[in-house]
C-alpha cells in the first residue's frame, strides 16, 4: 500500500495511481484529523469522494505517532495526548476517538489504536504496551459504529519478546476480528529478530484472514514476509527514496544523482513498462532529480509501478503454485554473486523454500538454522495468497 498520509500520494494523481494498478492506499488518522479535520471530510462525503479515489482505503489509527512524535506525546491508560505540531494545541487521542475519527473518514479498513513502542526498547515498557493494546482493542470494538462497512483490524504488539507476542496474538484472535496486523517492527531491530517475530505472529494468526506487516516496504522484506505467510504491507520507502533521486530496479536500486547517469541514454529499467521507463532516459532524469521537482514525481511514479508489479508477480506465483521458483528468481537477480544474507537463508529454511542454488558455495558454509537460536514457537510456512 502506498502511503498517502494526508489523503494524497506526494506528486501523483489518483488517475496515475489507477494507471499503475494500485488497489489500496493508506491515510493517517492523526494527520487527517489535524488537517482538514475528519468532520469536514465526513460532511463532504468521506475520504473516497474527497480525494476522488474509488478503490480501497486503509487508515492507520494514529498509534505510530506515539513513536514518531514521542517528544510531543504523553501516553496514559486513557489515551495519548499530542501537542499539535501545527498550532501547539493539545489533542487527546483515545481508542474511542480514534475509531470515531476513522468512522468519519470512511476508510474500508480501519486500525485499532495500539500502544506503540520501538522494538529497540527493553524492559517493563514493552509488557505495559502489549497489555494496554489488548485493553484498548475492546474499547475500539465497542466504539466502532460501522462494522458492516468498515473492517477493524487489531495490531499485535510485544516487541521482540516471543512470550509477549504470543499472548497478544492469542488475545486478538479471541476477539475474532476481520484482520490482523503485526506492529512494532521496522524500527531499527536486527533483521534476524525481525523475521522471527513475523514468522511467530503469522503462524498464530488465522490463515483465512489478512495478515498485515506494518511499515515494511523494502522489496526483499516483502518477499521474505510473504514466504512466512504475510499478506499486506505499507511503507513510505518507494516515494521517499524517489525524492532522494533513487529508483527501484530488479537488481536493487539505481542512484540517478550519480555522475555516471548524466550521459546514460537507457531507461531506468529496460524490463519495466511504466510510462517513465517508456518515455525518459536516465540522463534526463539525472538532470531533473538534481534541479527540478518533476524528477521526484517521475521517480515516485516508477517506484510505485515497480512495487505494484512486484506485488502482482508475487501474487500470481502463489495462485499458480510456483512461489518457490519466484523467490529463487528474485534472489538470483538481487544477489547475482550468491551472497544472500544469512537472515534471508534462515527465514527461507523455516518457510520450506530451498534457495541453495541462489547461494555461493562459500556463503552457504555459515551455520544453518538448526545451529541458530531456536524459534520461539514452531512455524509452518503457508504461502497464503496476499489480499
Image (cartoon, rainbow, N blue to C red):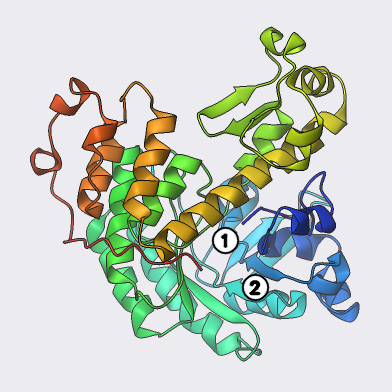
Residue labelled with disc 2: 98
**Badge 2 or badge 1: first in the primary sequence:** 1
Q: Position of residue 244 (x, y in %)?
A: 70, 27
Which residue corresponds to the image point at 62% horizontal and 79% vertical from the top-left?
Answer: 96
Q: Return the residue found at the far right.
A: 44
The answer to which quarter of the image holds residue 236 is: top right
Query: In the image, is 157 to the left or to the right of 376?
Result: right
Residue closer to the observer: 204 or 209: 209
Q: Rate crowding at label 2 as few (under 14), some (14 to 19) or many (20 or more) other CA atoms within 10 Å.
A: many
The alpha-carbon separation of the residues under discs 2 and 1 comes to 9 Å
Which residue corresponds to the image point at 45% horizontal and 52% vertical from the top-left?
Answer: 117
Q: In the drawing, what numbered circle is on residue 107?
A: none
Residue closer to the observer: 203 or 41: 203
Q: Return the residue found at the far left.
A: 371
Q: In the drawing, what numbered circle is on residue 63?
A: 1
Say which quadrant the N terminus sits in. bottom right
CB of mark 2 within 8 Å of CB of mark 1?
yes
| Number of marks in picture | 2
The answer to which quarter of the image holds residue 21 is: bottom right
Q: Secondary structure at mark 1?
A: loop
Which residue corresponds to the image point at 57% horizontal and 55% vertical from the top-left?
Answer: 64
Amino acid at each position: 500500500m502506498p502511503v498517502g498520509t494526508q489523503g494524497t500520494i506526494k506528486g501523483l494523481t489518483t488517475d496515475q495511481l489507477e494507471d499503475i494498478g494500485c488497489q489500496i492506499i493508506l491515510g493517517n488518522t492523526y494527520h487527517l484529523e489535524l488537517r482538514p479535520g475528519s468532520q469536514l471530510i465526513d460532511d463532504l462525503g468521506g475520504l473516497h469522494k474527497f480525494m476522488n479515489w474509488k478503490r480501497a482505503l486503509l487508515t492507520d489509527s494514529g498509534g505510530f505517532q506515539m513513536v514518531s512524535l514521542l517528544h510531543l506525546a504523553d501516553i496514559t491508560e486513557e489515551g495519548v495526548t499530542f501537542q499539535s505540531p501545527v498550532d501547539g494545541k493539545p489533542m487527546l487521542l483515545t481508542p474511542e476517538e480514534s475509531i470515531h475519527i476513522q468512522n468519519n473518514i470512511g476508510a474500508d479498513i480501519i486500525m485499532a489504536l495500539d500502544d506503540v513502542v520501538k522494538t529497540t526498547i527493553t524492559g517493563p515498557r514493552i509488557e505495559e504496551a502489549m497489555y494496554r493494546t489488548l485493553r484498548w482493542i475492546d474499547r475500539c470494538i465497542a466504539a466502532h459504529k460501522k462494522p458492516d462497512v468498515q473492517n477493524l483490524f487489531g495490531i499485535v504488539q510485544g516487541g521482540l519478546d516471543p512470550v509477549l507476542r504470543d499472548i497478544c496474538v492469542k488475545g486478538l484472535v479471541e476477539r475474532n476480528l476481520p484482520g490482523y496486523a503485526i506492529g512494532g517492527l521496522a524500527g531499527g531491530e536486527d533483521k534476524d529478530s525481525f523475521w522471527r517475530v513475523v514468522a511467530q505472529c503469522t503462524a498464530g494468526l488465522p490463515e483465512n484472514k489478512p495478515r498485515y506487516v506494518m511499515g515494511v516496504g523494502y522489496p526483499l522484506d516483502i518477499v521474505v514476509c510473504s514466504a512466512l505467510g504475510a499478506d499486506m504491507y505499507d511503507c513510505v520507502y518507494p516515494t521517499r527514496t524517489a525524492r532522494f533521486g533513487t529508483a527501484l530496479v530488479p537488481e536493487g536500486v539505481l542512484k540517478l544523482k550519480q555522475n555516471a547517469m548524466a550521459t546514460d541514454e537507457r531507461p531506468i529499467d529496460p524490463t519495466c513498462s511504466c510510462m517513465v521507463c517508456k518515455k525518459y532516459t536516465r540522463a534526463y532524469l539525472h538532470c531533473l532529480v538534481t534541479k527540478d521537482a518533476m524528477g521526484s514525481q517521475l521517480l515516485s511514479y516508477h517506484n510505485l509501478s515497480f512495487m505494484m508489479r512486484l506485488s502482482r508477480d508475487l501474487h500470481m506465483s502463489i495462485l499458480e503454485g510456483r512461489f518457490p521458483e519466484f523467490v529463487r528468481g528474485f534472489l538470483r537477480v538481487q544477489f547475482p554473486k550468491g551472497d544472500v544474507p544469512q537472515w534471508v537463508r534462515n527465514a527461507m529454511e523455516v518457510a520450506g523454500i530451498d534457495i541453495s542454488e541462489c547461494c555461493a558455495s562459500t556463503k552457504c558454509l555459515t551455520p544453518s538454522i538448526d545451529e541458530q537460536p531456536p524459534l520461539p514457537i514452531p512455524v509452518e510456512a503457508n504461502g497464503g495468497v496476499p489480499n
